[in-house]
Amino acid sequence: MSKETLGFQTEVKQLLQLMIHSLYSNKEIFLRELVSNASDACDKLRFAATQHADLYEGDGELQIKVSFDKDARTITIADNGIGMSRDEVVAHIGTIARSGTKEFFSQLTGDSAKDSHLIGQFGVGFYSAFIIADKVTLTTRRAGEKEATQWESAGDGEYTLEQVDKAGRGTEIVLHLKEGEDEFLNDWRLRSIITKYSDHISLPILMQKRAEYDDEGKEIPSTELEAVNQANALWTRSKSEISDEQYKEFYKHVAHDFEDPLAWSHARIEGRQEYTELLFVPKRAPFDLYDRDRRHGVKLYVKRVFIMEDSEKLMPQYLRFVRGVIDSADLPLNVSREILQQSRDVDSIKTGCVKKVLSLLEDLRDNRADDYAVFWQEFGKVIKEGVGEDIANKERIAGLCRFASTADEAAGEVVGLADYLGRLKEGQDKIYYITADTLAAAKNSPHLEVFRKKGIEVLLLADRVDEWLVSSLNEFDGRKLQSVAKGELDLSQFEDEAEKKQQEEAANNLKDVLEAIKGALGEQVKDVRVTHRLTDSPACLVVENHDMSANLERLLKSAGQEVRSSKPILEINPEHALVQKLKAEAAGERFGDWSQLLLDQALLAEGAQLEDPAAFVKRLNKLVLA
Ligand SMILES: Nc1ncnc2c1ncn2[C@@H]1O[C@H](COP(=O)(O)OP(=O)(O)OP(=O)(O)O)[C@@H](O)[C@H]1O
């Protein structure tokens, strides 16, 4: 087949530009990325060969070779891993086959200073070659196939594809260096980059042996190769032999991340199941955190043979940001996805690893508050999913959660449930919260008025996932969670006799008016009653304890779900001037309008949309002008 020219996907062009700008000051990472890909390709071959040993084709020793040619001004990275077929080259190199990519790139502003941090969320990979090269030639032969494919591009929007001959399987990448990048045509420089970033790779990374000198000081060039790295899998070494730097570099390799991790846990577990886990918490959420098809999770190895990546079997959804490896000593090597789905052994590994991650996060929470704040900012909403998802660990996960609160509102700090319990008022036996669709709506909700007055703290829940969280968490540390917008409010333990008496009288005085309002509003409300929740507002809405909150109802409706509305109860503030006015107008012709206004403003205050806003405006104007 003759040479064909194809165009890059638009996003690839954008990625290349972004990368060259944002990574120029750290350009040596191209080698880490290419070596990392080569090592993944060898891992894949090793696994494929557990089923088809002939894939090794007499070239059994997996390795990566790095070389350079001063005269040609090229650097070559070659592996004898799985290689790629022509179709795979088109699919993987020249296209970014990740859903959400378009949306991600639409966030770019074109201002490289502003955009440069975004590259970290995306990962750099193969294209990082173009930071230092103005032409890249990739030649690859898929294991088990005869034909090889050559891909070549100057990174300017197009690439060529050609069928070629290649001696062995695997991939060879030749970088033709840009003007001014000659510092990389240097044995010492390349070796030190490999040691810095890729020492932990479990395969040997080979380079030509250093030149020796004869007695007369003449160079004897050697054609022998030697390993530049330690070439044993990092997680198999003992903790005391691994430096923080090495852990960080290993993380960047497994996670394809660009930044250091926030924390990690490394342990060898013995007992019913024997395995090693090395798990990392990233510092930043990837752009596709909420994408169901996202890739890159925890990698499963069996006796150091890579089996697969990104298995939900190894980490629950709410810990989907965790990266790293689990290496089992007991699972069979030819374990398939299907077997994994049902394996009890895998379940017990997962249970153990989840506990490790939770301990790691608790440690972060208790001992590294600033880092925990970073973590919470990035992954808090995902962790909250865990309260509903992981019943066995519900209480621990709830203990990790942070919420906005009415305590110290000015500081805008988020608080944990344990902090809340530590500040309970004398006689308080519940954890109070309010849900709303924005923090502002929660904060300004009329339901909080009496709590503010009495100095009782209320948690302000405004994340979508919060409704799910509170529906799964009835209590924490033995204390019930109670919505301030649900049920009859009983704060009698905080009230003195005089207050109680006054409330009773107020309710008695308004008895007839309550009935009249109820009559005027008809089917719109379940009941109308006097409240002690309010100090400043005339009215608010509540639902019964077992009913769905109005906020959840709105969330479900906006997600297109059909929900049976639960009728609210209108509670009115006997002290408020508007209510007093209503009482005075009880027999008047405007009573119906006043009642409707009371209901409508209570709805607006909790963030609801009126069914007939125009009628509301008309009614309001009529009453104002009367
Ligand atoms: N040396 C190689 N041998 C075989 N396949 C490779 C090789 N290098 C890259 N690939 C294929 O190309 C794909 C894209 O590589 P690229 O480095 O762009 O992204 P990645 O490594 O998958 O992820 P990230 O973008 O997060 O780094 C890889 O997933 C792999 O399928």
Image: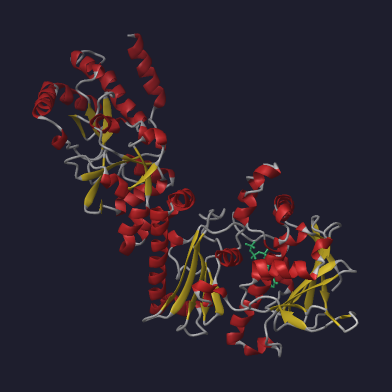
**x and y percent of residue 430 in the render?**
22, 45
Indicate left or right for 281 with 585 as reference: right
- 497 up-or-down from 124: above or below: above
**x and y percent of residue 203 in the render?**
64, 79
> Colour scheme of this structure image?
secondary structure
Indicate left or right for 50 with 216 as reference: left
Q: Is residue 62 visible?
A: yes
Q: Nearer the viewer, residue 461 or 239?
A: 239
Q: Nearer the viewer, residue 578 or 65?
A: 65
Give the image quarter of residue 477. Answer: bottom left
- 46 up-or-down from 624: above or below: below
Q: Is residue 138 visible?
A: no
Give the image quarter of residue 348. Answer: bottom left
**x and y percent of residue 38 in the render?**
68, 73
Quadrant location, the C terminus? top left
- 99 up-or-down from 167: above or below: above
Q: Nearer the viewer, residue 200 or 312?
A: 200
Quadrant location, the N terminus? bottom right
Q: Which residue is at the far top?
A: 626
The residue under the point 61% across, 85% down is 49
Quadrant location, ligand no. 1? bottom right
Number of marks present in the image shown: 0
**x and y percent of residue 345 in the render?**
40, 79
